Image (cartoon, rainbow, N blue to C red):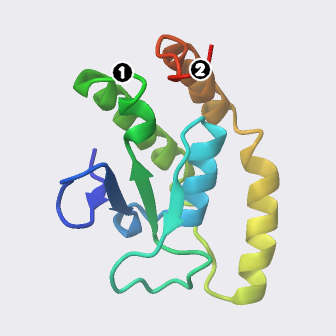
């Protein structure tokens, strides 16, 4: 989907997406993904020009989905949603100035929870994940 994976791929259950080529900040992407129902962590990438609180990457892990019985075809579907979320927040650029960044972040946090596209994706994800129960939870 054009998202750069640090290390060029995945050898284990974790991977780090470098979002600089998508012009999306990792903090922005992580919050948007959460609104859409996908949990991720903002994370610095190698040679990250942004400060640690607003890094350029997002770290993802697969144990939560593999333990629920999802397979490769399901991962492709999830990757599609991740891509849609990233595209939805492309252009929401984090300012370099500390004060401007604070104003931007406050407004973004307030607005992103009302984003219709992200809420639609969240609904699709709820339906999808309903087919894969969490182990140990009845």
Q: Which residue is mark 2?
A: 126
- The residue pinned by badge 1 equals 69
How many C-alpha atoms fall within 10 Å of the one at disc 2: few (<14), some, or many (≥20)?
Answer: few
Coordinates of residue 4 in the picture (x, y in percent): 27, 60
Regarding residue 92, the answer to whether it shows in the image is: no
| Label total for image | 2
Near-viewer residue (96 or 49) = 49
Image location of residue 92, percent across then percent down: 60, 61
Disc on res. 24: none
Residue at figure coordinates x 35%, y 31% from the top left = 66
- Circle 2: element type: helix
Quadrant location of the N terminus? Answer: top left
Q: Is residue 122 left or right of residue 79?
A: right
Is residue 100 placed above or below 107 in the rendered structure?
A: below
- Quarter of the image where the C terminus is located: top right
Mark 1–mark 2 CB contact (< 8 Å): no
Q: Residue at x 52, y 51 (%)?
A: 40
Left or right, residue 125 beside residue 72: right
Q: Determine which quarter of the picture holds residue 116.
A: top right
Viewer-proximal residue among 136 and 84: 136
């Amino acid at each position: 989907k054009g998202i750069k994976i640090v290390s060029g791929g995945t050898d284990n259950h974790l991977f780090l997406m470098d979002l600089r080529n998508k012009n999306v900040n990792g903090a922005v992407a992580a919050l948007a993904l959460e609104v859409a129902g996908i949990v991720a962590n903002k994370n610095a990438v190698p040679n990250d020009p942004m400060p640690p609180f607003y890094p350029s990457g997002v770290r993802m892990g697969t144990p939560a989905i593999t333990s629920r019985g999802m397979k490769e075809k399901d991962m492709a579907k999830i990757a599609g949603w991740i891509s849609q979320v990233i595209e939805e927040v492309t252009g929401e650029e984090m300012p370099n100035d500390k004060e401007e960044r604070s104003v931007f972040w406050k407004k973004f946090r307030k607005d992103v929870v009302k984003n219709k596209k992200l809420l639609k994706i969240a609904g699709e994800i709820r339906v999808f994940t309903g087919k894969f129960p969490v182990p140990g939870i009845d």
